[in-house]
């Protein structure tokens, strides 16, 4: 029966194809010249070039973090291509008709709605291919209510005052090794601005695709919700199947002012490498939200299924009184994948609340760690946190770890932490099989039950997608 | 319906079943009794296809088909049901959705229409009356936090939903109080039909007062030592198992 578990978890990666498209790339390697090249290519103002160079100079003094429970060959930063863009006549496609048909086919194959007519109702999409944003849908409609939704590069040109005000305000350029690297070389990403009092009428979404074999992806996302504004933002990602590792080092910053609410959902399905651990994306991402205003609300939901290595801690700084931070996570690892993921909830304001629900699933020879910090600062009177971290093991050779860090400096704070570890074992599967349910469907049902508390936080289409994805990822692993 | 010939099986290389012969026909109720560790639960698990046991010899035909050609889920869809002694708990999976999936898998295999959630809701509300289960148990996670008795109720409910040809009930009476035992015993009796067979595995004869077998077999040391009518159960109730073992030992010595 071990064979059944194994069969159920080794489905092939269906997004592993490469798009054959002419690209405009810089030679591999990193230097101030490369940074100047990127900045010039994007026609950036001097202050932004300075921001990049400062980050780069600081990055040179830093070393890679070693504390995570992941083991991988250190990337050679001089072998990475820091800029790669599909070659086009114009820097940005004015309409869908100008988009290279090969590129259109790529996104059709990925199921990403880049054609507004064919799009899912109610979802606007920004599509990022390697280093550039290819197209953004529903822009005009959103602009009608004052919402800015565009690629980061465009935002730099058209809304420099907003970028200048908020860029690096949540994740400073020198925050950590990969954030500093990103700050130096970021190429594109999305910018969202929801003005005061506006509830965004549709879900906003960015789809990231790495295509170039040598290229790293360093995107930058910035979302600002002004007083009383609200938005739900979705992020999806895939990459072709290569036998080398690609680096993905993104920075995401969220800012919520008084009574604003930002819901950020991710389904991460970067190529994970093959079953022997060859290839796959190194996913080193810094995501942080600042609940700057009173009663502001930031919620992270992530379904992490891809990448060879995941190092990611979407966090909330609860600065405003009565602000709320949430983190809902499903992290699934299989074969040789390694994930060290979790969150930080930093309570600074009074009566701030945070909730952490983390579900880790490990199959194959994978390693899956939850690492989370709950910090209550001295002035955070009445702060409350609830954390629930559950791990599920499939098979005999996977591992799960939980590293909760709790620092409380205010006596009125209430912090609760619960953790469980369970196993999909022979007995559970046999029970389902004895009722006529084949092993694969049994696993899928058990996993979905395990992840229910997280899935119900996802927007509907995403929840369906996530459920399918988990089943696919686990195909072949039960036995 | 079920024909077992010289069946041997082991777990981790240790023989547990050492040559079982048993014939079960439609409409019959058989009881397998025996002291703890005799191999009686193993027999049920081997028939259902539990992965921990290795069949080392013999033959089992179920309706003429070699049972060991079928995966455990295919055996279930072919009509073999096992009521577990210790049903597992599955957090997050609602009892109702589990029951519906199991029902639909069987329906699909039988070429009957599958039931959508609304149709199944009507269907299952009839079925729970049989085992006197409260509705709330349908919405709860499968067996999670159920008492021993509630778990057993749920097992018989599943039997009622799946309408098996052969139901193997492993220690149905363990963890049940007298009243619950009577309710479930009655439910099983009502489920019994001319085209269905029951194999009751039990340590205590008490349950056989409600579910009355035509055949009682005493299993010990991986072999069936004695087979007789239901009067044997009464005798075991009075005298225990030792005399059967002694008798068999004496028989073996002769």
Image (spheres, coloured by chain):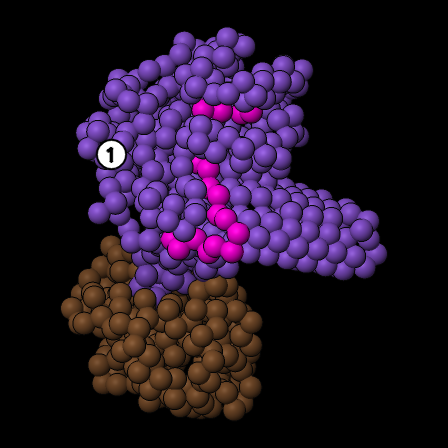
Chain colours: A purple, B brown
Q: Nearer the viewer, residue A142 or B13?
A: A142
Q: Residues within 10 Å of mark 1 (few under 14, many from 20)?
A: few
The residue located at (47%, 51%) in the rendering is: A231
Q: Nearer the viewer, residue A149 or B140?
A: A149
The residue located at (32%, 61%) in the rendering is: A437
Quarter where residue A126 is shown: top left
The residue located at (43%, 53%) in the rendering is: A200
Q: Secondary structure at mark 1?
A: loop
Furthest toward the right, the residue is A411
Q: Which residues are magenta?
A: A182-203
Image location (x, y in percent) of residue B142: 46, 69
Confirm whether the magenta stretch covers residue A287: no
Q: Nearer the viewer, residue B26 or A280?
A: A280
In this figure, which residue is indicated by the disc labeled 1? Answer: A95
Image location (x, y in percent) of residue A408: 79, 50
- Name the side, left or right, on which A132 lies relative to A291: left
Residue A383 in the image: above or below residue A373: below
């Amino acid at each position: 029966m071990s064979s059944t578990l194994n069969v159920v978890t080794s489905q092939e990666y269906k997004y592993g194809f490469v798009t054959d498209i002419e690209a405009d790339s810089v030679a591999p390697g990193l230097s101030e010249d490369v940074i100047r090249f990127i900045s010039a290519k994007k026609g950036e103002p001097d202050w932004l070039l300075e921001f990049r160079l400062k980050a780069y100079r600081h990055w040179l003094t830093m070393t890679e973090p070693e504390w995570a429970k992941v083991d991988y060959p250190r990337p050679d930063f001089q072998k990475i291509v820091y800029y790669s863009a599909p070659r086009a006549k114009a820097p940005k496609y004015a309409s869908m008709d100008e988009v290279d048909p090969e590129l259109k086919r790529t996104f059709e194959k990925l199921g990403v709605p880049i054609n507004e007519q064919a799009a899912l109702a109610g979802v606007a999409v920004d599509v990022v291919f390697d280093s550039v944003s290819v197209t953004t849908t529903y822009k005009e409609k959103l602009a009608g209510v004052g919402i800015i939704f565009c690629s980061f590069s465009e935002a730099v040109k058209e809304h420099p005052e907003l970028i200048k005000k908020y860029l690096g305000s949540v994740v400073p350029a020198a925050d950590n090794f990969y954030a500093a690297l990103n700050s130096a070389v970021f190429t594109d990403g999305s910018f969202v601005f929801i003005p005061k009092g506006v509830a965004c009428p549709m879900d906003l979404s960015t789809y990231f695709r790495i295509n170039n074999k040598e290229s790293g992806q360093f995107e930058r996302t910035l979302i600002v919700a002004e007083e009383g504004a609200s938005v739900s933002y979705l992020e999806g990602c895939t990459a072709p199947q290569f036998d080398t590792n690609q680096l993905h080092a993104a920075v995401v910053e969220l800012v919520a002012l008084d009574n604003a609410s930002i819901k950020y959902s991710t389904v991460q399905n970067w190529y994970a490498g093959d079953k022997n651990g060859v290839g796959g994306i190194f996913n080193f991402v810094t995501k942080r939200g600042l609940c700057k205003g009173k009663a502001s609300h930031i919620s992270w939901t992530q379904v992490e299924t891809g990448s060879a290595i995941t190092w990611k801690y979407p966090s909330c700084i609860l600065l405003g009184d009565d602000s709320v931070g949430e983190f809902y996570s499903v992290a699934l690892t299989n074969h040789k994948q390694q994930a060290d993921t979790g969150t930080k909830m930093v309570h600074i304001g009074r009566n701030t609340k945070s909730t952490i629900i983390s579900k880790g699933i490990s199959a194959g020879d994978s390693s899956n760690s939850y690492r989370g910090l709950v910090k209550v600062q001295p002035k955070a009177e009445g702060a409350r946190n609830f954390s629930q971290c559950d791990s599920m093991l499939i098979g005999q050779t996977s591992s799960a770890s939980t590293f909760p860090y709790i620092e409380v400096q205010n006596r009125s704070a209430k912090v609760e932490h619960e953790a469980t570890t369970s196993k999909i074992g022979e007995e559970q599967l046999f029970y389902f099989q004895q009722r006529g349910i084949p092993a694969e469907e049994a696993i899928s049902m058990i996993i979905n039950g395990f992840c229910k508390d997280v899935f119900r936080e996802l927007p509907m289409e995403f929840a369906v997608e996530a459920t399918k994805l988990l089943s696919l990822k686990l195909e072949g692993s039960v036995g | 319906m079920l024909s077992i010939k010289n069946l041997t099986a082991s777990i981790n290389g240790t023989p547990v079943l050492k040559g079982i012969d048993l014939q079960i026909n439609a409409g019959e109720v058989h009881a397998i009794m025996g002291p703890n560790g005799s191999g009686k639960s193993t027999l049920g698990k081997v028939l259902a296809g539990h992965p921990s046991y290795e069949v080392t010899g013999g033959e089992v035909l179920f309706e003429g088909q070699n049972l060991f050609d079928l995966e455990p889920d295919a055996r279930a869809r072919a009509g073999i049901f096992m009521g577990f002694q210790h049903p597992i708990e599955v957090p997050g999976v609602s009892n109702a959705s589990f029951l519906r999936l199991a029902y639909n898998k069987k329906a699909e295999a039988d070429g009957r229409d599958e039931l959508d959630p609304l149709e199944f809701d009507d269907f299952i509300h009839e079925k729970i009356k049989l085992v006197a289960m409260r509705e709330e148990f349908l919405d709860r996670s499968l067996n999670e936090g159920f008492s021993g008795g509630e778990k057993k109720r749920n097992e018989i409910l599943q039997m009622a939903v799946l309408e098996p040809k052969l139901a193997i009930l492993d220690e149905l009476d363990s963890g049940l109080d007298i009243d619950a035992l009577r309710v479930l015993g009655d439910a099983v009796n009502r489920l019994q039909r001319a085209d269905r067979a029951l194999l009751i595995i039990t340590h205590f004869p008490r349950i056989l007062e409600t579910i009355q077998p035509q055949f009682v077999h005493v299993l010990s040391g991986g072999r069936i030592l004695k087979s007789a009518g239901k009067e044997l159960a009464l005798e075991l109730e009075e005298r225990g198992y030792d005399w059967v073992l002694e008798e068999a030992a004496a028989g073996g010595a002769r």
